[in-house]
Image (tube, helix red, strand yellow):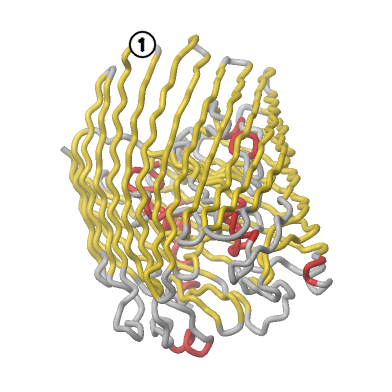
Amino acid sequence: MHTRFALSAVALAVSALAQAAPSTYPLDDIIVTATRTPLPDVAAPYASEVYTQAMIQASGASSLVDFLTQNTTLNVAPNYGNKFTPTLDMRGYGLTSGYQNIVVSLDGQRLNNIDGMPQLLGAIPIASIDRIEITRGSGSVIYGDGATAGTIQIYTRPYQGVTVAGSAGNYGAQSGTVAAGLSRDNFSISASNDYQSQRGTSDADVTGQRDASNLTTQRGQVRVRPIDALWLTLDGSSSKIDTRYAGHLSLAQFQSDPAQNGGNTYTHQKFDSDQWRLGASLDLTPDTKLTASRNREDKLSNYVSPYPYKANYDYVTDDVALVHGGDAFKLTTGIQRFDGTRIGASDQTSKNNIGYYLQGQYVIDKLTLSAGARREKVEYNYVPNTGSALHATQQLNAWDVGSNYRLTATTSFFANYNQSFQAPDIDRFFNFGGTFNAFISPEKVKTVTLGANHSQGNHRLKLAVFRAKLKNEIYFNPATWANTNIDQSHKYGLELQDSWRIRPDLNLRTGYTYTRAIIDRANSGGGAFDGKDLPGVPRHGVTLDMQYDWSEHSTFNVGYVWRSSSYAANDFGNNFSQKQAAFQSTNLAYRYRYKDYELSAAIDNVFAQKNGLWVSDNVIYPVSFTRNYRVGFKARF
């Protein structure tokens, strides 16, 4: 009832304001860079979804994970309660392992792990983000292993001047940012320190501990131009996370009070991540540049309790690319190497990738054509402290062809055909108890996407339909407790984005997805899964966002997200008595800006909807079930 009232109120407000005289106030031009050569999104030969810094700030989201959950068409949920490493689902790969079918990068650096741990998105300060690009059904040529559903590219910005910001809210929520930067023609330096903490939204566990968390992140960057054609960059960051997250509840417990602990001892986990990156960009000609970078990350994941486990990660990435950006012909070619090692108490396991790729784009009047290919070698090594070592290699290919035709100055149509792959993570080769399972087959996907773009002054519409055919989709069979393959499966759906600036002070954005994910044949399930829906995939998803510039200095934002119910995460036979309930949340944000000062207020989940992650019958992890409010300030000097 509360949700229907909120939507009705928003609709009436929009309708009333829309009766005013229409304005030609233009929307911001959107640029995409998935192929490393920027072009307008309406001319892109693939499906995309872009969020600018202005959109992110207006949303009032307190973290990157909250923004992705509340404002994008992605399906996002805490990973069994861990909000710093959320699970991600795009185009029907499911919340269980959908994050492994999306390559997530930060300023070009991969965040995907070599094992079953999701990407550490919670360590990225939202204040540092310049834009987010989501590429759907494409990206396998540039990004390689894991880009089966697509990619999420996050780009940060250097700070200029001094910024001080802070916020406080209920449940002991606090955040603070101190950042400074200086930029000159041949030199720039930027540094920041971010802090977040919360005392928890659930009751204390059996040991008296709350589901509290705190995060500190320090980032720094230095850029110098020793000669006109050369830029050198040195980046460094350090993140430390200490978090506890709640266990599962039964249905009766969840319905009674999702804040109760259910007799659990909360998982206590610590993350330490330190990384540095050295990069160079050399202009060979006005249209051609050579880029090179090396990134190293040392990460510690320490499960303190109730089941102690500690692992060190050592990741090294090398990336060399030649980029030509002429008016008619654009070309990107390069070599990427990723060496990842996990060091545990009893073994050392590594997954090493090296890929070679070529991606070209040619513009003929109103027609844009693109084509690319990639060859990648994946090598695995398992070296236990005692016992026999294991070794395996895989050779995998990806390719992508696309076109975009500008029918008029405001309307274009595009088509994309992509082949992608996912090499198994190192955990897939082992059973639950740590014994060797098998070197399971890599996942291979062919995806067709057709779409249309319309952009005219104050209105922008994007529509895409897709179908994906999969061979050896990778999954964990809960019935046998083993990682294995779905022999054949397919996915199809529709994606809609609409942005309408009704008048200069009012903008409405809408997103809708329809997704089906079908298991065609799974020999590992003995035929019981054949023809069933892949669990954890909602058929419908809706996001609504209204931004109203109340005055010259103030902005009001209303957001709503809804995802339909689906089968529970482990329900591959579609026969559990309990299903994943629909997710919904209504969010409000207000900002007042005067010169270099800003005050803000926000309320998340206004109607305190009880949301949860259903794994199986009576195994429910509560998520986003409280009404959260906060107030904040920001000052720039």
Image quadrant holding the C terminus, namely: top left
Residue at 53% from the left image edge and 34% from the top image edge: 32
Determine the residue located farthest toward the front in the rendered image.
386
Residue 266 is situated, as x and y percent measured from the top left of the image, at: 39, 77
In-front residue for pair 413/628: 628
Local secondary structure at mark 1: loop
Residue 120 is situated, as x and y percent measured from the top left of the image, at: 44, 54
Residue at 73% from the left image edge and 53% from the top image edge: 441
Going by the numbered disc 1, the residue's amino acid type is Asp
Mark count: 1
For disc 1, the neighbor class at 10 Å (few under 14, some 14 to 19, many from 20) is few
In-front residue for pair 549/563: 563
Residue 442 is situated, as x and y percent measured from the top left of the image, at: 71, 50
Name the side, left or right, on which 67 lies relative to 618.
left
In-front residue for pair 161/603: 161
Name the side, left or right, on which 577 lies relative to 80.
right
In-front residue for pair 106/481: 481
**Residue at numbered disc 1:** 228
Q: Is residue 481 above or below residue 355?
A: below
Residue 20 is situated, as x and y percent measured from the top left of the image, at: 44, 48
Quarter of the image for residue 236 reads top left
Q: Is residue 533 above or below residue 465?
A: below
Determine the residue located farthest toward the left in the rendered image.
637
Q: Is residue 627 above or below residue 50?
A: below
Residue at 59% from the left image edge and 38% from the top image edge: 143
Residue at 52% from the left image edge and 86% from the top image edge: 250
User: Is residue 74 in view from this perspective?
Assistant: no
User: Is residue 29 in view from this perspective?
Assistant: yes
Q: Is residue 538 above or below residue 599?
A: below
